[in-house]
Image (spheres, rainbow, N blue to C red):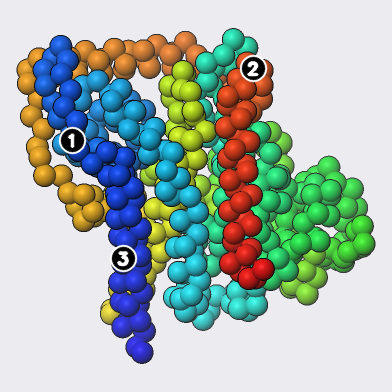
Amino acid sequence: MGLLKYVKTQINKLDDSSTSLFRSVLTDIECLRKKGKTINNDIGTYMHNVKDIFNVVIRSCSDNTTIRESIDKNSSFNDTYVSGITYWLNKVYDLNTFTDQYYKIYQLADSMRKTLFIFKNNPLRRIYNMYNVLVGDGTVCKCSFRNDHGKNIASYTVSIILNMATNLVYDHTILFNNNELTGILNANLTKSDIIVLDRGYSKLSFMDKLAKRTYFVIRLTRNLMIYKRFMKMNEQSMIIKCNGYKIKLIKYSVDKETREIIKSRYNGCDNNDEDDDSIFVIATNLTDLSSKEMSELYKNRWSVEVCNKNIKSNFNIRHIVKQYNSSEPIKKISFYTSLSILIYNITTLEKRLLEMKYYYQHQKRIEYNYSQHVNLYKEYLIDTINPVNKTVVLTAERKMHRLIVNKRSAKKKKNYSRNNKIRGKYKSLEYMAKLNNRDDIISQIKKYYKKERDIMKLRKFAQFGD
């Protein structure tokens, strides 16, 4: 089969898989309530069908203001009071519809020819053919939290493990205690993998645990003794013994322009002065890697930073829960994070396939804009799965009420941002829940972790068959 024909076949396969998946989602939503619902209030009468929630969900709404805007533009809802919609959204969060679906897209890409992702002149081609090269990192998100102790916004970390060759998410975990090391150790890693990590993961105890399961390439921090000893030597690379296994160390030179980019990316973080160093030390327990391959692997670690940026910029997961009185924030966080990563995998794979299709047609490389691609895909989903068949026309009274509601919300948000300029990291959501005796949220967190463990067991069963 010609390469162009093969790419077109894979595009159709991805299109069929994704639309089939979202059609089943719409079916699940329709099962919540098949009939429309008519509500009377002091402003008038309006009607909506619960399946229109699908359109609101696809746009990844994160707060009431966003929901109102989405309802006006993209569905047949005409609900000035969003309480009814929030009720149905909470029902949707309980479905666990998007849980682990992103992994199916990853497997689809894994079954495709590697030439779609790896060019002949790629310096890491040998490594990609021998190992599954992964890169890990965490990104911090916010969660509004009503409390009587300290700050009123908590944080949690989404730990992402990305396939370096395809740029698709291989695994993810939400860490409500912000312990990024746990997210990597809980992943399904084997000796057929190499995982590339930044200096935040360079604790010796962590590397000891990781070395028993997989191969790693990690940048070391200054405070490690092996770093200090190696920097005093004139050698550019060396192999040492560490707790029963061998580690290869190399010195990696970083130009000034790259250092400035890194510093701007991590502005305000702890130990930022280490990014002023012109030489980094990189360690690996796969000692047959060359210094050039280690350098290239670490340089390509930046792909996970781009992934985190794309997910947070295009899918509204920076601050999913903004309501301080939210009773079940964990379900909402889990739902929209899974949905965002699912659409990220679909759109990233589709973008790559379309770029390769263009290359095989014109023998010329092109790179499509990712944000535009995401917006087009969301529009395509809604038009294909659940097209809007009713234009909402608000009465003058309803428009006035909507303006008052939105103006009040905007004023409250402006006053909050003016009077609550908080610097630094927020306390973890798990810590804040314990501090405020929110046993209900602690229970939700435990349920989430249990669900993640069950998913990992199912993956291992599917992989090894026992």
Q: The C terminus is located in which quarter? A: bottom right
Q: Mark 1 points at which residue?
A: 36
Res 9 label: none
At 60% from the left and 34% from the top, the residue drawn is 445
- Quarter residue 79 falls in: top left
Q: Which mark is residue 437?
A: 2
Residue 13 is situated, as x and y percent measured from the top left of the image, at 34, 71
**Which of pointers 3 and 2 indicates the residue nearer the eye?**
2
Q: Can residue 136 be seen in this view?
A: no
Vertical placement of 2 versus 53: above or below?
below
Question: Where 8 falls versus 400 (above or below)?
Answer: below
Image quarter of the N terminus? bottom left
Identified by mark 3, the residue type is Asp
Q: Is residue 159 left or right of residue 311?
A: right
Q: Where is residue 282 in the image (x, y as percent from the top left)?
A: 75, 58
- Of 135 and 442, which appears nearest the observer? 442
Circle number at residue 15: 3
Residue at point 35%, 81% (across, down): 6
Q: What element carries label 1?
A: loop
Q: Give the image quarter of residue 124.
A: bottom right
Residue type at tag 2: Asn
- Mark 3–mark 2 Cα distance, whole angstroms, equals 47 Å
In this rendering, the answer to whether 98 lies above or below 153 is below
Q: Is residue 134 left or right of residue 211?
A: left
